[in-house]
Amino acid sequence: YELTQPPSASVSPGQTASITCSGDKLGDKYVCWYQQKPGQSPVLVIYQDRKRPSGIPERFSGSNSGNTATLTISGTQAMDEADYYCQAWDSSTVVFGGGTKLTVL
Amino acid sequence: EVQLVESGGDLVQAGGSLRLSCEASGFTFNNYWMHWVRQAPGMGLVWVSHINSDGTSTSYADSVKGRFTISRDNARNTLYLQMNSLRAEDTAVYYCAREDVDWSAAMMTTFYNGMDVWGQGTTVTVSS
């Protein structure tokens, strides 16, 4: 099973960033999203498609339908510049997307 | 403080073996599924293996199946990854991570809640 993400995305500060993750019938699975900044461990920002762990800002949201899951960051801040990875379970194994480098410029 | 601390990473020759450890603290270890995830230099996250809360169920990525073994000691709050027949392509930072997984008998559904705590990683370098 494969999850496909665009390698890069860019957004201006204060605008909305959207990062997609595609997979066969992905809408039938739960998707998580992770943020990773250089030299740091990943951080869970969305789980079960749209739920935010405690401490994650409300500007992070998620959706999942059909073959595509989307991470949306509203009012993007400079601190949101990072790599973002989607992840799902498939047949008792875990799959990560290839990651999207988000640039805030 | 909830924490995962990996250790055991080293420089090893191709064909060699290594055992990684991940010590958990600040939470009830035997309530959580655990994962190993690796990241080669400059590359993305790649899932390696998982083990359920009591150690009775495991799974592996195809790339490590038959070479790596995941295990846990709930009495010691420690997760392990035994790595044999190492290859140059196994070179990576190895992270352990926990995941809260719920089974609903009423809905006959497993609810995965994401890897919400990660260690700082331990570096494995395999020289060819």
Image (cartoon, coloured by chain):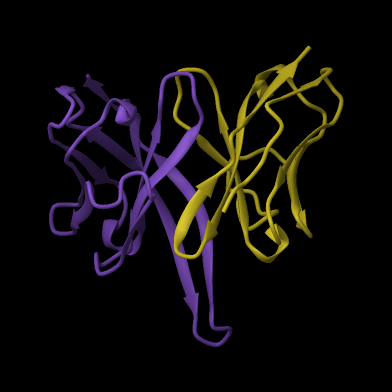
Chain colours: A yellow, B purple
Q: Position of residue B30 (x, y in %)?
A: 27, 62
Q: How many marks?
A: 0
Q: Residue at x 41, y 25 (%)?
A: B40
Residue at the far right: name it. A15
Foreground: B27 or B34?
Answer: B34
User: Between B86 and B47, which is closer to the camera in this rendering?
Assistant: B86
Task: Work out whether residue A100 or residue B7 is closer to the camera in this orientation and state it.
Answer: A100
In the image, residue A24 sits, relative to residue B126, either above or below, namely below
In the displayed structure image, the side of residue A47 where residue B31 appears, left or right: left
- Residue at 85% x, 31% y: name it: A16
Q: Is residue B114 left or right of residue A102?
A: left
The quarter holding residue A10 reads top right
Quadrant containing the N terminus of chain A in the rendered view: bottom right
Residue B59's place in the image compared with A45, above or below, is below
Residue A78: where, in percent of width, then height? 71, 17
Residue at the bottom extreme of this rendering? B106
Rendered residue at 81%/34% (across/down):
A74
Residue B121: x and y in percent read 33, 30
Where residue A26 sits: x, y (%)?
A: 69, 58
Q: Relative to residue B120, is residue A52 depicted above or below?
A: below
Q: Residue at x 49, y 25 (%)?
A: B43
Tell me the quarter of the picture where residue A15 sits. Answer: top right
B79 displayed left or right of A49: left
Indicate the quadrant containing the C terminus of chain A: top left, top right, bottom left or bottom right: top right
